[in-house]
Amino acid sequence: MSTSRPKYAYFGGDIVPFEEANVSILNHTFNYGTGVFGGIRGYWNEDEEQMFVFRPQDHFIRFLDSARLLSFEVDETPEHLIEVLMELLRTEAWRENVYIRPLAYISSERIGVRLHGLDYAVAIFSLPFGQYVSNEEGTAVTFSSWRRIDDTMIPARGKITGAYINSAFIKTDAERAGYDEAIVLNQDGHLAEGSAENVFVVRKGVVYTPPVTANILEGITRRTLMHLMREELKLEVVERDIDRSEVYLADEVFFCGTGVQIAAVTSVDRRPIADGKMGPIVQDLRDLYFKVVTGRVDKYRHWNQPVYEQVPTKSS
């Protein structure tokens, strides 16, 4: 993974040097976690010397929906945010895979917990990014002792900054116990997701995933993979509640998300999943997915937003 830092950010309505994109320690969101964010990836296609941003319209729609959950009065549209993002990425001139982070936050500097009647702002930055988990082809997982936050407490379908302390508890405990990741159960004792990933379980040729009512993020990568599995791999994909014991008996298990992309879970609580190796469905899905996100599948080219208006040449 690159150690490069952003040189620019969208902040205060303009693209500014990254060092100028700062908030006060009195900032409301800094004090109370009252913000929302998004995660978007841009993929560098070496053959075309072009960067493709994957499904930016869908990501910005979800981003603004998260802001609506918090009653933010954000005067933005997905179309304008895409324009801003394209300008930002062209200014950065990245020539490698990047991760993009839009943020909506309360810019008011005041003490007092509430969401309404305050000032709101949007910022965006990008940075080079590789793997989210170190071993995408053999992830070791445990079931977390923490439960996923419930919709009646903090909606998991919104990417709310303060809610991710739940994910941080899950991830830290898993790594300290010697695992790469964790699966977390919801309040009903059924599978929800990973610390920051959606999860799929394969049993007897059928692919299962928790429904959006199981306190999960309504993942865009999740939705993408469900479509690709049904339409291209001709698999049956079922959304339903999944018991913990089903995971131990699975033929394949995998995580997905913008950050993690697709990671094969090969053991859970030191128990191997099937033969303890990445299975054929996950392998085929990974191969297809990385072709799609880099613009190499014409049928799904419309999911990819090219960054550079004119394809740069090697001499440029």
Image: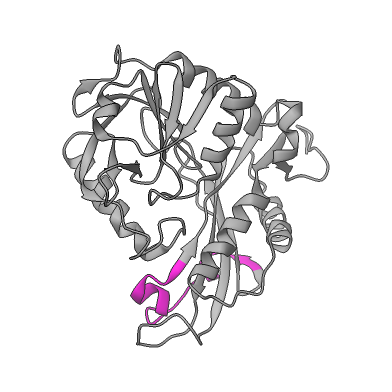
Color scheme of the displayed model: one colour
Residue 223, position in %: x, y? Answer: 56, 40
Residue 144, position in %: x, y? Answer: 22, 43
In this view, the residue farthest toward the top is 275
Residue 162, position in %: x, y? Answer: 36, 65
Residue pictured at 68% horizontal, 60% vertical: 78
Left or right position of 82 against 19: right
Question: Which segment is the magenta one?
Answer: 15-35
The front one of 262 and 211 is: 211
Taking the magenta stretch, the answer to whether it contains residue 104 is no
Left or right position of 269 against 20: left
The mark total stands at 0
Residue pictured at 65% horizontal, 29% vertical: 292
Residue 8 sits in which quadrant? bottom right
The front one of 243 and 226 is: 243
Against 168, is 120 above or below? below
Taking the magenta stretch, the answer to whether it contains residue 19 is yes
Residue 288 sits in which quadrant? top right
